[in-house]
Image (spheres, rainbow, N blue to C red):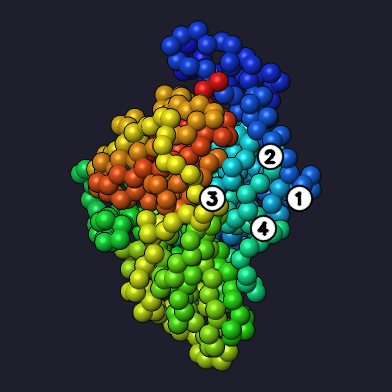
């Protein structure tokens, strides 16, 4: 059977009972049959998750909105319920989220919600066309799944470059037996912002797609040249953003966290950006890094940390007395986002403040170790896949293994795994740019003892091996979380065989 036939069976099976059996039985050619997102293997895995039985019901409307970014800056964008970031969702481990998405986006704009980082049932992953049909304007779709791992997550659409609109919000899964001791927490969402200020993400993508060959860069409204970072191995990013936001605010009019000196606060830092890594520091404080991408690590102290698109870091700080800037420096881009911590009197710093901690030790995932209770015991794999990251700016042909992802034929880029096996992915970055590679539905481990993550930075010309247990059957996207690289084609599916 060719891949188009297999795909149409998968799609036809969505919503139809018994689709898994159908997909499993019709394998006649050399291509293996794949687990259907709505099939019995997915349902069985969800059943094993069990859960508390408690339901958390919410409604989300994706619609055009005029949002206030502070400092007199207003922007026409698309947002959930008129605000950006959208309202945080908070669950307790094992609870079922029931979220009804209403699509009120303009024209023919379809959408979806992807629950980034959550190991959920495949048919609720919100990745059209692999796991569902995109939600049409004027219609609704209800997501319903058990969230069984505590941690810091977020959600966003998985259609086109909608990630670079205002359509994102934090998703926090609390641990009822939280082992960390702290007094309070503060969710810090970072975002690079263009929409409704200098143009739209679709316009940005249209310009990037023309490639650099023969382009007159001086007249280019969206393309940023010369963003360089040693930490990122060279070219840091390619999109010119008029603003970098922390919790939806511009630096001139920042979000303020008010607390008391001596209190211990857990910061949950989320990079919801599309083309910007941030170097984050809180002036006057060292941070103790406790988690990345929801999972615990062996605690490490640092002055600053580097966070790529799609990554999350949790840190503990013990508050000092005064007013302190939390700065998210757009790595290699020379501009920054700002928020404030206020525990006493003092004047607020200017928008351009650059705490010296930014130039101290900068934590990166490669220096972290998984906590003992989440480390994958041995790093031996049953199957190894070489994932070459390919393409470049010249032709804007970002791809995996030289094949740009084709939405009409997702299986053409299928990376096959079998349930119950340990898989290893060797990311080999042949390009001259870094890529934050994200796998849906799983939390892989970096190397033998590195952190468990779902999004990992792969530096230019470098190789990164990650391991994961294939314990969540379905069809899962694997892609660069640079919204523009992913949309250009640096995307594949990790496909469970039936
Ligand atoms: Cu946060 Cu496939 O995405
Ligand atoms: Cu990329």
**Residue receiving disc 2:** 49
Circle 4 packing at 10 Å, graded few (<14), some (14-19), many (20+), is some
Compare marks 1 and 4 and give the one earlier in the sequence. Answer: 1
Of discs 1 and 4, which sits in the foreground?
4
- Where disc 2 sits, the SS reads helix
* Residue 174: assigned label: 4
Q: CA distance from mark 2 to mark 4?
A: 16 Å
**Residue receiving disc 1:** 56
Which residue is painted at 53% across and 75% down in the image?
317
Of residue 185 and residue 93, the one placed in the foreground of this image is: 93
Relative horizontal placement of residue 92, taking residue 163 as reference (left or right): right
Pick the quarter of the image with the C terminus: top right
Q: Do tag 3 and tag 2 residues touch (Cβ < 8 Å)?
A: no
Number of marks present in the image shown: 4
Compare marks 1 and 2 and give the one earlier in the sequence. Answer: 2
Q: CA distance from mark 1 to mark 2?
A: 16 Å
Relative horizontal placement of residue 224, taking residue 316 as reference (left or right): left
């Amino acid at each position: 059977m060719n891949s188009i036939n297999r795909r149409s069976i998968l799609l036809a099976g969505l919503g139809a009972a018994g689709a898994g059996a159908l997909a499993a039985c019709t394998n006649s050619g050399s291509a293996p049959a794949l687990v259907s997102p709505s099939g019995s293997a997915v349902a069985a895995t969800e059943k094993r998750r069990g859960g508390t039985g408690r339901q958390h019901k919410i409604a989300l409307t994706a619609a055009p909105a005029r949002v206030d970014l502070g400092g007199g800056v207003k922007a026409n964008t698309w947002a959930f319920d008129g605000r950006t970031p959208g309202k945080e969702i908070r669950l307790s481990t094992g609870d079922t989220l029931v979220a009804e998405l209403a699509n009120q986006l303009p024209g023919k704009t379809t959408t979806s919600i992807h629950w980034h980082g959550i190991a959920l049932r495949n048919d609720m992953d919100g990745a059209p066309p692999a796991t569902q049909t995109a939600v049409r304007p004027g219609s609704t779709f209800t997501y319903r799944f058990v969230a069984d791992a505590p941690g810091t997550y977020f959600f966003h659409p998985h259609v086109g470059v909608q990630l670079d609109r205002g359509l994102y919000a934090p998703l926090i899964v609390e641990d009822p037996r939280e082992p960390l001791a702290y007094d309070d927490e503060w969710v810090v969402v970072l975002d690079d912002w263009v929409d409704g200020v200098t143009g739209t993400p679709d316009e940005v993508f249209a310009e990037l797609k023309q490639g650099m060959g023969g382009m007159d860069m001086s007249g280019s409204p969206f393309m940023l040249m010369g963003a360089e970072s040693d930490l990122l191995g060279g070219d840091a990013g390619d999109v010119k953003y008029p603003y970098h936001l922390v919790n939806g605010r511009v630096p001139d009019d920042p979000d303020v966290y008010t607390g008391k000196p001596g209190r211990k606060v857990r910061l949950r830092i989320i990079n919801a950006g599309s083309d910007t890594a941030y170097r984050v520091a809180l002036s006057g404080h060292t941070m103790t890094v406790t988690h990345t991408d929801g999972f615990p690590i062996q605690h490490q102290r640092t002055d600053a940390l580097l966070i790529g698109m799609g990554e999350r870091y949790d840190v503990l700080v013990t508050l000092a007395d005064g007013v302190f800037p939390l700065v998210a420096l757009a790595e290699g881009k020379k501009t920054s986002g700002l928020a404030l911590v206020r525990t006493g009197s003092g004047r607020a710093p200017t928008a351009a403040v650059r705490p010296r901690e930014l130039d101290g030790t900068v934590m990166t995932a490669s220096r972290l170790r998984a906590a003992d209770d989440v480390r994958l015991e041995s790093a031996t794999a049953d199957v190894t896949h070489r994932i070459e990251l390919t393409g470049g700016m010249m032709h804007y042909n970002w791809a995996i293994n030289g094949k740009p992802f084709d939405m009409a034929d997702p299986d053409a880029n299928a990376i096959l795994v079998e349930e119950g096996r340990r898989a290893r992915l060797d990311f080999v970055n042949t390009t001259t740019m870094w890529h934050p590679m994200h796998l849906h539905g799983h939390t892989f481990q970096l190397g033998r003892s590195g952190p468990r993550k779902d999004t990992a930075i792969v530096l230019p010309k470098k190789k990164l091996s990650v391991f994961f247990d294939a314990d969540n059957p379905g069809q899962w996207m694997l892609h660069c979380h640079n919204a523009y690289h992913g949309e250009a084609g640096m995307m594949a599916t990790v496909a469970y065989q039936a």
